[in-house]
Each structure stands twice: as structure tokens, then as C-alpha cells.
Image (spheres, grey):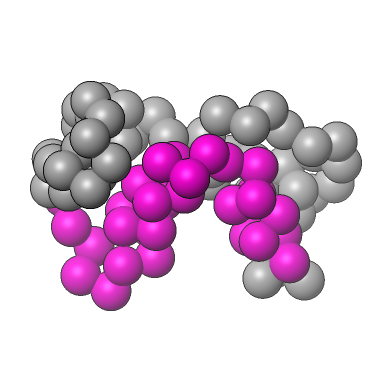
Amino acid sequence: EVQTVVDQAMSELSPLHQRVVDLSVFDDEQPAAAEVAERVAAEHGAAMTEANVYKITSRFRQRVRELLTGDGDTPGPNV
């Protein structure tokens, strides 16, 4: 069930935000937000700040909680 919820929450994200979550949540090294921002900016050619990383990660975790508790049955926005 948890993997299904994580997969659903990830599918609701844009590819850029998926990469942020991959690095900041699921990477074994758990790089700092500044490093995540730097890597994503270099890989995608998009502006990214530490604050962006924190916000994207926070929204992802909130969405997973909503889906697990049944409070988020409808798809979230593709952010």
C-alpha cells in the first residue's frame, strides 16, 4: 500500500519536482537541500533554490500523508 501511495504522489509531480524528491527523499546519501538545488539546476537548466527544495519535499510528504489517511482521494495538482 505504501509503495502504491508513493508512486501515486510521485506521478502527480512534474519531472523536475520528481527529480527533487528522488534526490532529497530517496537518495541514500541524503544530500543537503543546497546540493539538491545545485544538481537539479545543472541537470535541468532550471532555477532552483534551497527554499524550492524544502517546499517541494514538504508538499510531497504532505500528499503522501493525505493519501495514506484517506484525506487525499482526488489527484493533486501537477506541480
Placement of the N terminus among the 4 image quadrants = bottom right
Residue at the location (24% across, 62% down)?
30
Placement of the C terminus among the 4 image quadrants = top right
Residue 48 placement, left or right of 65? left
Query: In the image shown, does 59 or 36 lie closer to the viewer?
Result: 36
Residue 16 placement, left or right of 29? right
* Residue 57 in view in this figure: no
Magenta segment: does it hold 19?
Answer: yes
Name the dominant secondary structure of the magenta segment.
Answer: helix
Residue at the location (26% across, 30% down)?
46
Query: In the image shown, does 42 or 33 lie closer to the viewer?
Result: 42
| Rendered location of residue 21, percent (x, y) | 41, 51
Magenta segment: does it hold 20?
Answer: yes
| Rendered location of residue 76, percent (x, y) | 72, 33
Quadrant in the picture for residue 45: top left
- Rendered position, 30 above or below 18: below
Residue at the location (43% across, 35% down)?
56
Instruction: State the extent of the magenta-drawn residues as a range.
Output: 4-32
| Rendered location of residue 54, percent (x, y) | 32, 34
| Rendered location of residue 10, percent (x, y) | 59, 52
Quadrant in the picture for residue 57: top left
- Rendered position, 16 above or below 29: above
